[in-house]
Amino acid sequence: MLAMQLLTSTLTTVLAAVSVLGHMEMTSPCPRYSPKCATPSDLPPGTVLDYNLNGPIGTKSSANQPFCKYTTPWPRVSDTWTAGHPVTVTFANNGASHSGGHTEFSISYDNANTFVVLHQVLRHSFFTAPPTSSGSDTVRSYTFTLPAALPGTSHAVFAWTWVNAIGNREFYMNCADVAIVGNAGSYTGKAMTVANYGPLYPSIPEFMGNYDTGIQLYTTSTSQVTVSGTGFSNIPTSTIPTLSSSANTPVYSAAAMPPSSSWY
């Protein structure tokens, strides 16, 4: 009996460890509710830190959570970026990369309702080359340059999204709140790709060995989003304004969230 209890306890511990290490999550800029970088003082009232940010927000059959996983606006920004300048996004070293997949980095100016794509990493994300060509699973950061025409705003929502190459057909998304130093204006670009996120969106099957699977959703889509900002100049972090629900409304909507009834 004692041996069985010890075995059960050991299996539970192992499974818990696998669960923690089972997926992937963004570490910088600091995602909403991340215990790795957020503090309790950052949290909106009535919320807690999330120790499962490495899990998907949906599968091909169900949209389990809304975009960014939470709908409560985050009160402060975690980083300040400048239009036209390079930025670096980092990921957990112990994350599971599921043999790569398709990644996008996008930004929203309407509190995570619509997103415009800033950068793509397609086919074998997190690998130096395709795993089938002896690629190494060692990539845990990406650096890219923000569009020079990206409008300035005191509060935008930056998103990392990922469709994994192998394993359950899932859609991953982490969001971080950033300020963008730049002029007033608008920027138009490709709408964020959403797949494996319930029956209202396309499903991409496993694609280990055929890394062009689903690629047309990322490269041939004609859906576009225009975001607008009133302009923003860099000021001390302690005085950065909090999010206003009426500011920076997008001109065009695409890649919108499914009905709220599908979140539960």
Image: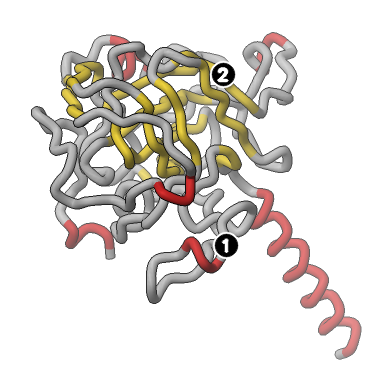
Left or right: residue 221 versus residue 181 is left
Identity of the amino acid at label 2? Thr
Measured as percent of width and height from the top left, residue 201 is found at: 23, 36
Residue under pointer 1: 39
The residue lying furthest to the left in this view is: 251
Quadrant, the N terminus: bottom right
Left or right: residue 24 versus residue 1 is left
Q: Tell me the SS state at disc 2.
A: strand
Image quarter of residue 175:
top left
- Residue drawn where x is 68% and y is 50% of the image: 21
- Mark 1 vs mark 2: give the one in front: 1
Q: Tell me the SS state at disc 1.
A: loop
Q: How is the image coloured?
A: secondary structure
Quadrant, the C terminus: bottom left
Identity of the amino acid at label 1? Thr
Left or right: residue 52 versus residue 226 is right
Of the pair 132 and 95, the residue shown nearer to us: 95
Measured as percent of width and height from the top left, residue 150 is found at: 30, 19
Left or right: residue 2 versus residue 110 is right
Residue under pointer 2: 143
Task: Determine contact: label 1, label 2, CB under 8 Å.
Answer: no
Q: Is residue 173 above or below residue 84?
A: below
- Residue drawn where x is 32% and y is 39% of the image: 154
Q: Is residue 199 visible?
A: no
- Residue drawn where x is 71% and y is 25% of the image: 137
Q: Is residue 176 visible?
A: yes
Measured as percent of width and height from the top left, residue 153 is found at: 29, 34
